Amino acid sequence: MAEGDAGSDQRQNEEIEAMAAIYGEEWCVIDDCAKIFCIRISDDIDDPKWTLCLQVMLPNEYPGTAPPVYQLNAPWLQGQERADLSNSLEEIYIQNIGESILYLWVEKIRDVLIQKSQMTEPGPDVKKKTEEEDIECGDDLILACQPENPVKALDFDVSENRTIEIEELPPIDHGIPITDRRSTFQAHLAPVVCPKQVKMVLAKLYENKKIASATHNIYAYRIYCEDKQTFLQDCEDDGETAAGGRLLHLMEILNVRNVMVVVSRWYGGILLGPDRFKHINNCARNILVEKNYTSSPEESSKTLGKNKKVRKDKKRSEH
């Protein structure tokens, strides 16, 4: 396999894992070898009025030089409405050539469905009967597991004049653990606006003997530099090869800013294979959703394509 093909394959795998973590059961694998996937998109998860299935096939050249091959499946989508939506997806691809765009496509379609639901026309009669039983999203579990007094992490406002606060240790929240075959994964989240705070959060976490004893403490962070309109971001595998990069990729797709996520893994003696990456991403995604760090679809679609400039922090050495 050529080096370019290997790079595309890795980027595709990272995007597929991120999409599965973001959308849960809405994301479906049709043919893993052929890279064919389907995602069900609705205007409202709890009470869907309009639903569309987007089927995509990822060619070897994606995302570098070729777009996904896609099909829009909805009995109500006809004529000009279908053409307009197709044009919108192609425009997103042109504006983001070389980038992973599946998340942008899904949220653009969701935007269209939401706008359609706000119009006076009723939804198709056949839809609710066929989908009501299937609608079970991971978000339901996340909402049910929120603590009674959650810390409002987004209240940690960032402005140019805040010079004293950024020297302080930010609040740290801990997610609900996920256990699989005796391995346990737990995410920790903190708002950060400078690399010094990243080090402070890590030092604070390592004061906890249980966290310090974890087999791996994978982390990633993204800090938005308002003056330069760029992101300062970095990640650390801590011995779990490629885990930090996959975690950072998830945070990029979710378009989060001024936050770091640490995922601790306590190895239980049984190899999990690729499932370990799924659990790491799910832990991270859950706590980011719980603490309201995920952007609205409108904000994500507008900003993810624009804020591409990224400045990498100097990585610390592998252990």
Image (cartoon, grey):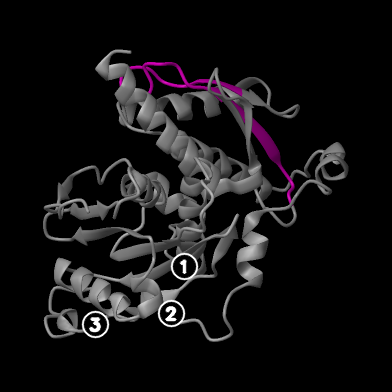
Instruction: Tell me if residue 5 is in the magenta stretch.
Output: no
Evaluate if marks 2 and 1 touch, with contact meaning CB atoms under 8 Å apart.
yes
Three-letter code for the amino acid on which mark 2 is drawn? Lys
**In contact (CB < 8 Å): disc 1 and disc 3:** no
Q: Where 227 sits versus 145, above or below?
A: above
Residue holding disc 1: 292
Give the Cα distance between marks 3 and 2: 15 Å
Whether residue 64 appears in magenta in the rendering, the answer is yes
Q: Which residue is label 2 attached to?
A: 152
Residue 92 visible in the displayed image: no
Write down the region rendered in magenta. 48-71
Q: Tell me which residue sits at (65%, 51%) in the image.
A: 118
Give x and y (percent) for residue 78.
Answer: 68, 23
The quadrant the C terminus occupies is bottom left
The amino acid on which the numbered mark 1 sits, given as a three-letter code, is Asn
Q: Mark 1 or mark 3, which has the lower sequence index? A: 3
Residue 95's place in the image compared with 187, above or below, is above
Label 1: how many residues lie within 10 Å, few (<14), some (14-19) or many (20+)?
A: some
The three-letter code of the residue at mark 3 reads Leu
Q: How far apart are the alpha carbons under marks 1 and 3?
A: 20 Å
